[in-house]
Structure formats: structure tokens, C-alpha cells
Image (tube, coloured by chain):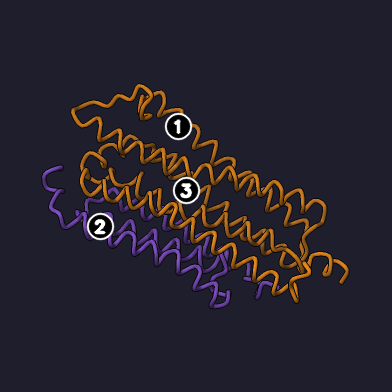
Chain colours: A orange, B purple
Amino acid sequence: MSEDRSALAHQFHSLEQQFEASRLGMWLFLATEVMFFGGVFTALSVYHSSYARIFDEASRHLDLTLGAINTAVLISSSFTMAMAVRSVQLGERRRLGGYLAATIALGSLFLAIKFTEYFHKFEEHLVPGLHFSYPGPEAPRAQLFFSFYFTLTGLHALHMVIGVGILLVLLGGAAQGRYSSLYHSPVELSGLYWHFVDIVWIFIFPLLYLPGLRH
Amino acid sequence: MSGNVVPKGTYLLVYLSLLGLTLFTTGAAFLNLGPLNPLVALTIAVSEAVRVLLFFMHVRTSDRLVWVFAAAGFLWLAILMSLTLSDVLTRGWQRFLL
């Protein structure tokens, strides 16, 4: 019970109430994140409605294989994150550390693959503003598509970098035995953030990588 | 403290279904379904997102206040998109710019 009391801030009646308050705060933050990414997705759909043909053609220059692998990597990281939360709920501290480390590894792998894709785009002169070159008279519209590509995937990658940082802090906390079956709000709330970032990618992948594939 | 612990098998099932849906949406993108292509892709994406929300993010076992907060973000996004697109898509610009 001493552990119980040390985690309870004085303005709350119980750990249960404290957890529910912080969880609600996290969901409020995630609602603002939905609007944040939603604005870019709305802008993409507006421009796609006007420039559908050239946007779809430009999307063929994205690397489908790496994009699909990254989707699988990110979904796997969400699974290991869910298992990390489950482990701490059950008080399995060693497993918590293992699943957190696996999630960090998968998140870093995602970022490494993303960086490889960016590097290829740089080599192919498909980065807007940096010697952008695209064959045909519709190059400016193709550049617009790649602006959306870099904005959406860049903001997403930024969220991933922040997420990996948060997980590293959690891993440190787990190593010190800071979380238990009674108190694990930081693990659970970071999980919510990580899964949200996964959902953003679940929409980025079909909207950016897939439209140009049909024949 | 945070309600019921979800069985390992449930997480595994959700995980495998997400991988399967990713394969499915990628495969469907190669077929020419005309205007149905984006509809199919978005339907699968929404189905995947709902799985993550309900199971990985524990919305299914959370109290109703969490449901309201989670739904609020998507409701306002729906307002943003529907009002914006109802304007843009009814101006008849698309035909000239294709």
C-alpha cells in the first residue's frame, strides 16, 4: 500500500479517479491531434479532387514495397505496445521491459525505413523546392503532391520520434520498477498516443501510396 | 485499476486481422474499380482504425465519457470535411482541371 500512496496526488480521492482524470486528458489531447492531422487530410482531398490524375500518377513514384513493410512494422509495434500495457496491468515487470524495448526497436526500424525513402526521393529530385524535377508540363502539380507527401509523412515521423523518446523514458522507469499493477498510468497513456500515431499511418498509407496502382 | 485485462488471444487476433487488411487493401489497389477504389481503400482504413480504437486503445472497456471524447474528435473532423467538400465538389471545377 505504501507504493499505492506515493503515486496518488493529494487532489484525488483514489488511484482509480486519478487514472480516469489523466486518461480523459489524454483523449482530449488526441481529439486535438485528430483535428491537426485532419486539416492536412482535408486539404489533400480538396486538391486531389481537382488534380486526381496527376496526383495518382505522382503517387506511383512512392516506394510501395517500403511503404507496405513500414505499415506492417508499425502495426506490429502497436501490438507490442498493447502487450506492454497488458504486462504491466498484470504486474509482469520483466515482460513490460521486453515489450517496451520491442516497441522502441520497431518504431526505430520504421523511422530508418522512412529515412531511406526520403533519401531516395532526394536522389530522384522529388523533394519540393530542392532541385525538384518531374517530366511533363504538370510538374508544379506533381510538386504539390510531393509537398503533401512530405508534410503528412514528416509530421507523422515527428510524432514517431517523440513517441520513441517517451518510450525510452518509460523503459527507464520500468527498469527502476516505477510501474506496477496498481499504478501504470504513464504506460497506458503513452500507449494511447502510440496507437493514435499508428491510426494516422493507417490513413496515410492508402491515401498516398495506393491511388496510383490501378490499371 | 484500468478495468479488465484483455486476453492475449484478442490482441493477437486484432493484430493478425490488421496485417491481413493491409495485404487486402494493397491487393485491391491493383484492381481497377473505377470510382470505387478510394471508397474501398477508405472503408478498409476505417475498419482498421476502429479495431485499433476499440481493442488496442481500450475504448471498448472504457466509460462513456471516454467514448464522448473519442467521438468528438472524429465528429468535428467529419464537419470540417463534409462542409469543405460539399463546397469544393459542387463547383464543377474538377472537369476543367483534369
Q: Viewer-proximal residue, A180 or A34?
A: A34
Q: Is residue B24 above or below residue A18?
A: above
Give how far apart the Cα atoms at labels 2 and 3 are: 28 Å
> Which of the 4 image quarters holds residue A64?
top left
Say which quadrant the N terminus of chain A sits in: bottom right
Q: Which residue is mark 3?
A: A71
Q: Which residue is mark 1?
A: A118
Outermost residue to the front: A11
Give amino acid for label 2: Leu
Give amino acid for label 1: Tyr
Q: Is residue A171 above or below residue A7?
A: above
Give how far apart the Cα atoms at labels 3 and 1 are: 16 Å
Circle 2: element type? helix
Give amino acid for label 3: Thr
Circle 3: element type? helix
Q: Which residue is mark 2?
A: B85
Give how far apart the Cα atoms at labels 2 and 1 are: 31 Å
